Image (cartoon, helix red, strand yellow):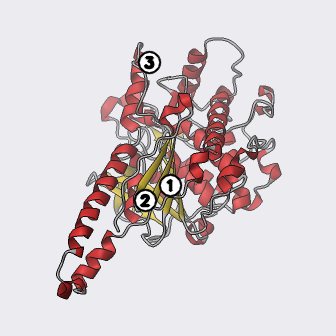
């Protein structure tokens, strides 16, 4: 979940979102709103549903025919920052509802389950219900009308550490400070509330049999190896999603089939490589990757900024590394394909040569990369579950997705059997950079 768990308060999920225009007065949120089951999701489920602020800009992207493309949504871990992913999805979902594959780690796994585990018309409502619940504790509803914003953010994060987060985790009755590091505890917090939340908001029958491939990353505690739970290979339950979000030492490992698992972000915080490795080769692949930590950033000048920057670097995705590896593979394959053509005629139909040719063939891969670049580098940003922070993250996701959908470069159809990355790293100038590798013949 949140990457802060390694420090004392386990990382958990991001918070509910509403636009300022629709935000209710703080007093109306004095008590947590009821959790709604997937069977009863509807307008009443979220009380004041997040009004859509997605406009006609997205129509440009929709002119591109994606009917013969595998469409994957890849969601990084990042605790409370995950509300940004919910905003991105809200903007995408208004006019484009078809997904073939959702892959996530930590909070990305939770958001992904809320998406893949609900009917298309209920997905945004499920995200709203979740984020509203996790930001509904009295200490998280303080308005940000003036005052030291960083101080308020730290107070909110501190409240989460001491009192827990509704629908996610509670402090264990035996305080850690009573025992020190030798405390006989599997985790500082009890995550049973998260299980109940998932059971209420996710339709696991739809998640496993609804037609959307669903993958979540975790780490085997005993071996230290990454593993992906995938509904193509096993039946997914709440325990698999909880395992993906079990960031130590805050959250306990989750026991599944004789093994114990921690948060996938301990090894790899982004499931992009899993999707690239497992992609169906018969169709082109388009990935919408939503990251919560930026690898690039300014030099920090305070201890708090140092901690925030360290998290950014540690937990940011290795998208450029992954695409570089893929480009290298493609270019090597191109050279190998040229060599195969030079084989004598009597070897051209050899079964092993034919098999090698099939493996060399790769359809185009497009990676549309959104990175959350918050203007407030707080050390506690990933476990600050205040209503104000959740609203801010969600709105930023909507804005960034609108800008991406409207960009004319997304209309370009990739014909080369290579990889193209639409990267918003130059976001100050609203530029998209292409990284294209030539494909095999």
Q: Which residue is mark 2?
A: 275
Q: Is residue 172 visible?
A: no
268 left or right, relative to 72: left
Q: What number is the disc on residue 304?
A: 3
- Reading the chain from its start, which is encountered first: label 1 or label 3? 1
Disc 2 to disc 3, C-alpha distance? 34 Å
Nearer to the camera, 69 or 16: 69
Nearer mark to the viewer, of 1 and 3: 1
Nearer mark to the viewer, of 1 and 2: 1
- Residue 145 x %, y %: 72, 16
345 left or right, relative to 77: left
422 left or right, relative to 403: left
Disc 1 to disc 3, C-alpha distance? 33 Å
Asked whether the beta carbons under mark 2 and mark 3 sit within 8 Å of each other, the answer is no
224 left or right, relative to 399: left
Q: Which residue is mark 1?
A: 287
Q: What residue lies at 73% left-to-right and 36% top-to-bottom? A: 18
């Amino acid at each position: 979940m949140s990457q802060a768990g390694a420090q004392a308060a386990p990382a958990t999920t991001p918070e509910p979102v509403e636009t300022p225009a629709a935000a209710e007065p703080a007093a109306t949120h004095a008590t947590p709103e009821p959790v709604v089951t997937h069977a009863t999701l509807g307008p009443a489920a979220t009380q004041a549903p997040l009004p859509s602020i997605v406009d006609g800009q997205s129509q440009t992207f929709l002119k591109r025919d994606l009917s013969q493309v595998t469409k994957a949504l890849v969601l990084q871990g990042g605790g409370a920052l995950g509300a940004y992913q919910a905003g991105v999805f809200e903007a995408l979902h208004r006019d484009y509802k078809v997904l073939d594959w959702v892959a996530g780690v930590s909070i990305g796994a939770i958001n992904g389950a809320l998406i893949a585990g609900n009917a298309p018309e209920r997905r945004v409502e499920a995200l709203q219900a979740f984020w509203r619940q996790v930001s509904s504790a009295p200490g998280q509803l303080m308005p940000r009308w003036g005052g030291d914003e960083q101080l308020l953010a730290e107070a909110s994060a501190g409240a989460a550490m001491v009192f827990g987060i509704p629908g996610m985790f509670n402090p264990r009755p035996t305080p850690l400070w009573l025992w020190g590091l030798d405390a006989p505890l599997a985790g500082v917090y009890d995550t049973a509330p998260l299980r109940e939340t998932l059971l209420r908001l996710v339709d696991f029958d739809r998640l496993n049999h609804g037609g959307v491939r669903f993958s979540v990353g975790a780490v085997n505690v005993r071996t230290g190896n990454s593993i992906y739970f995938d509904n193509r290979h096993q039946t997914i339950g709440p325990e698999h999603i909880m395992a993906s979000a079990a960031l130590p030492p805050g959250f306990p490992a989750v026991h599944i089939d004789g093994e114990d698992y921690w948060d996938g972000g301990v090894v790899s915080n982004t499931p992009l490589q899993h999707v690239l490795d497992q992609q169906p080769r018969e169709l082109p692949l388009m990935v919408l990757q939503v990251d919560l930590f930026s690898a690039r950033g300014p030099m920090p000048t305070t201890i708090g900024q140092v901690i925030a920057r360290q998290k950014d670097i540690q937990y940011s995705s290795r998208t450029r590394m992954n695409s570089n590896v893929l480009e290298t593979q493609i270019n090597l394959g191109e050279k190998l394909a040229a060599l195969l053509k030079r084989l004598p005629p009597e070897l051209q139909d050899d079964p092993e040569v034919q098999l090698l040719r099939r493996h060399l063939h790769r359809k185009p891969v497009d990676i549309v990369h959104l990175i959350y670049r918050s203007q407030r580098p707080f050390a506690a940003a990933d476990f600050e579950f205040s209503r104000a922070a959740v609203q801010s993250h969600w709105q930023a996701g909507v804005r960034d997705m609108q800008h991406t959908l409207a960009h004319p470069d997304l209309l370009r159809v990739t014909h080369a059997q290579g990889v193209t990355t639409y990267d918003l790293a130059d976001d100050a100038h609203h530029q998209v950079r292409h990284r294209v590798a030539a494909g095999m013949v």
